[in-house]
Amino acid sequence: MGKNCPDASRTFADDEKKTAHDAPKRVLVLGGSGLLGQALVQTLEKKRYETIAPSHKELDVCDARFVEEYVLSLRPDYIYNAVAYTAVDKAEDDEANAMALNRTLPCTLGRIAKSAGIYLVHYSTDFVFNGKRNTPYDEECKPAPLSVYGKSKLEGEKALLFLNPENFCIVRTAWLFGHGRKNFVRTILERCALQGSVNVVHDQIGSPTYSMDLAEYSIALAECNGHGLFHIVNAGCASWCELAAEAVRVSGCDCPVFPISHEEYATKAVRPAYAVLCTAKFTATTGIVPRAWPLALADYLNLEYQDMPHH
Ligand SMILES: NC(=O)c1ccc[n+]([C@@H]2O[C@H](COP(=O)([O-])OP(=O)(O)OC[C@H]3O[C@@H](n4cnc5c(N)ncnc54)[C@H](OP(=O)(O)O)[C@@H]3O)[C@@H](O)[C@H]2O)c1
């Protein structure tokens, strides 16, 4: 167990006992409609947090004063910020909007969290790195983003680290797949059904991560009062092509997956060739060892495609 985390051995029964006596902790989730946001809301509710997740329309996150009034009227114990400008290629031509969501918003939230003593969990990305290494990146590695998206996310991190609220963590994650929103795995399986074969990039390597695991792990980190920068991904690494091939194999599709180079799959934004993240600091803090991505992928596919004939 992580030495900083006295609560790590708590069981679900303990949680039930605790909530019978104490008022449930209140949590504000921003971006609750996103891939990660949906997983956070579901997991927090299951863990009996009082969870409030305003939609895009209910809360204009670009209006700093309104955000402050909203947060102060709600007085949450935690804020999870899963809002982001995540359209990596579009961001190349839309820097101002990418910066507004990926830099200004975390800065606003950091300021509010600091003055009101709220614990803030913010998310960032493997795309802050240039991918020139060939061993996993830890939190000490120097970022050098290759894209506007990566740059805007790094600016958000820097703003928060500079503010250094008493209670906050920045969780860098990568290559998310999960329920309720478009993601790489779903896209591959849709293409298989339509085209009968897929060509997938083999020369970019990363850390595939299940949104439900990331939600659970980051809630555990917040419960342990993790402070500062952390990497959280599922264990192991893969190329996009290996991830696609495993998804196709597990889902039982009869669809060849052909490797292609990143040059053959032109994208506007440059992506790191290698962006595997090391989670040792997260494990040292929480006592949790993230499970391997193929296990997580199998769970995702089982839940997501349970109505398909081969399941
Ligand atoms: N997906 C990945 O592979 C990946 C990899 C590394 C890091 N991350 C990081 O993980 C975090 C979560 O990513 P995700 O994939 O879950 O993102 P996502 O699915 O694209 O969701 C983004 C969320 O932000 C909201 N949003 C976007 N623009 C907004 C605006 N102008 N005002 C208010 N809300 C707005 C979206 O609301 P609507 O539903 O209304 O659009 C949605 O709830 C982000 O910090 C991201 O940088 C993701």
Image (cartoon, rainbow, N blue to C red):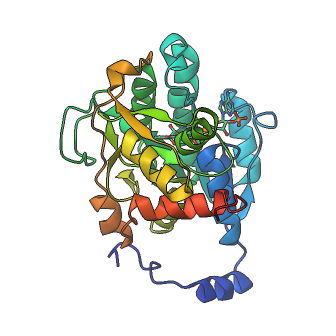
Q: Quadrant of the C terminus?
A: bottom right
Viewer-side residue, 181 vs 14: 181
Q: Is residue 118 visible?
A: yes
Q: Is residue 162 visible?
A: no
Residue visible at 58% across and 43% down in the picture: 189
Q: Is residue 128 left or right of residue 101?
A: left
Percent across and percent down for residue 301 are 58, 58
Residue visible at 70% across and 36% down in the picture: 67
Viewer-side residue, 294 vs 166: 294
Residue visible at 49% across and 34% down in the picture: 198
Number of numbered discs: 0
In the displayed structure, would residue 227 be above or below residue 149?
below
Q: Is residue 147 left or right of residue 138?
A: right
Percent across and percent down for residue 27 are 67, 58
In the displayed structure, would residue 254 be above or below residue 1?
above
In the displayed structure, would residue 195 be above or below residue 73?
above
Q: Quadrant of residue 282?
A: bottom left
Q: Quadrant of the N terminus?
A: bottom left
Percent across and percent down for residue 143 are 28, 33
Viewer-side residue, 290 vs 54: 290
- Residue furthest right as drawn: 58
Viewer-side residue, 41 vs 222: 41
